[in-house]
Image: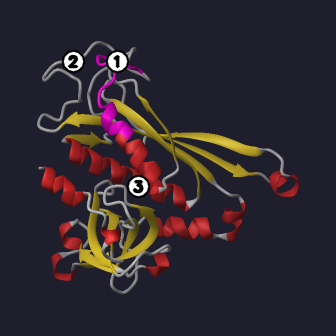
């Protein structure tokens, strides 16, 4: 295994200008994430420098088998915390070969809204508090819970510390640092009310960048749990009964007209949404 670790941690920049770009997109369910990697001749600093790519949409629930080609358009670049060096993660959205957004491409419509001059002038800030649950891989039961049984009642777990209250902190801290490395504006983490449940916060981020950052943060979390041998669930109610669910509080803030004139106060709302 030491040889495998050595190979994974190879610093390619010592011997080649080539980099690896991991193209990421949202799959057909609207929740599953997909990715594939390609070699590029050298470092890039902007999505416009990246080539479009394609994939088999019939294998992701996004195209029929007889016409399965889907085209990936690079939209945002992040540093790759797994391969490191000049390697990158690339958030993409998906289109038909004719250039039409596929039905599951929600980013396209959102980008049109956020790029409208009237919207951009409001400087829409978002802060997203993403809750999730860590599950034992083979039994799909929260980490730290006895198999087929239950821990003590909720109360001591929220922001708790200690081996009997905090389960999965190694995954959480790894994710926190990996997001900072990637350039995601992750602003914090904490243990949640149900044992084995956690939260991370992304933002403040302006406009469409908030969506790109939360999706890539989810991708990084999925990759880390893959390495750790646990499963991450964004299910809003992973355990039935009197156990807290998981969602995403979306905090929204924009400039008011007085701000544009005088630099006055910002208007603030908090929207509580049950996002998976």
Which residue is at the front of the view, 144 or 169? Answer: 169
Discs 2/1, front = 1
Residue at image position (31%, 35%) is 170
Marks 2 and 3 in Cβ contact (< 8 Å): no
Q: CA distance from mark 2 to mark 3?
A: 31 Å
Q: Is residue 268 above or below residue 124?
A: above
Quadrant of the drawing holding the C terminus: top left
Position in image of residue 261 (x %, y %)? 87, 57
Where residue 132 sits, quadrant-wise, is top left
Helix, strand or loop for the magenta stretch, by majority? loop
Q: Secondary structure at mark 1?
A: loop
Q: Is residue 236 above or below residue 186?
A: above
Q: Earlier in the sequence, mark 2 or mark 1?
A: 2
Q: CA distance from mark 3 to mark 1?
A: 30 Å
Which residue is at the front of the view, 160 or 60? Answer: 160
Q: Earlier in the sequence, mark 3 or mark 1?
A: 1
Discs 3/1, front = 1
Q: Is residue 50 above or below residue 4?
A: below
Q: Is residue 104 left or right of residue 140?
A: right
Q: Return the residue at label 3.
A: 215
Residue lying farthest to the right in this orientation? 262
Residue lying farthest to the bottom in this orientation? 98
Q: Which of the numbered marks, if any, corresponds to residue 162?
A: 1
Q: Secondary structure at mark 2?
A: loop
Q: Return the residue at label 2.
A: 150
Where residue 62 sits, quadrant-wise, is bottom left
* Few, some or many residues within 10 Å of mark 3 (<14, 14–19, 20+): some
Residue at image position (60%, 39%) is 270
Q: Which residues are magenta?
A: 160-173
């Amino acid at each position: 295994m030491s040889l495998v670790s050595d190979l994974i941690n190879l610093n390619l920049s010592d011997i080649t200008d080539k980099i690896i770009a991991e193209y990421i997109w949202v799959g057909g369910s609207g929740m599953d994430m997909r990715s594939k990697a390609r070699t590029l001749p050298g470092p890039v600093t902007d999505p416009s420098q990246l080539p479009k790519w394609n994939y088999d949409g019939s294998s992701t629930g996004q195209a029929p088998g007889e016409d399965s080609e889907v085209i990936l358009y690079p939209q945002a670049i992040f540093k790759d915390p797994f391969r490191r060096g000049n390697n990158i993660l690339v958030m993409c959205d998906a289109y038909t070969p004719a250039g039409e957004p596929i039905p599951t491409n929600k980013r396209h419509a959102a980008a049109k809204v956020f790029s409208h001059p009237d919207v951009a002038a409001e400087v829409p800030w978002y802060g997203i508090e993403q809750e999730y649950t860590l599950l034992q891989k083979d039994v799909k039961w929260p980490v730290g819970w006895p198999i087929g049984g239950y821990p003590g009642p909720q109360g001591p777990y929220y922001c708790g510390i200690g081996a009997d209250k905090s389960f999965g902190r190694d995954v959480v801290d790894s994710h926190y640092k990996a997001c900072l490395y990637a350039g995601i504006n992750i602003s914090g983490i904490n243990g949640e009310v149900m044992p084995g449940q956690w939260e991370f916060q992304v933002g403040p981020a302006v406009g469409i960048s908030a969506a790109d950052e939360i999706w890539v943060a989810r991708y990084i979390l999925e990759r880390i749990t893959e390495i750790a041998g646990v499963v991450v669930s964004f299910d809003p109610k992973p355990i039935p009964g009197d156990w807290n669910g998981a969602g995403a509080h979306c905090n929204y803030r924009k400039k008011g007209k007085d701000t544009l004139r005088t630099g006055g106060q910002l208007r603030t709302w908090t929207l509580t949404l049950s996002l998976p």
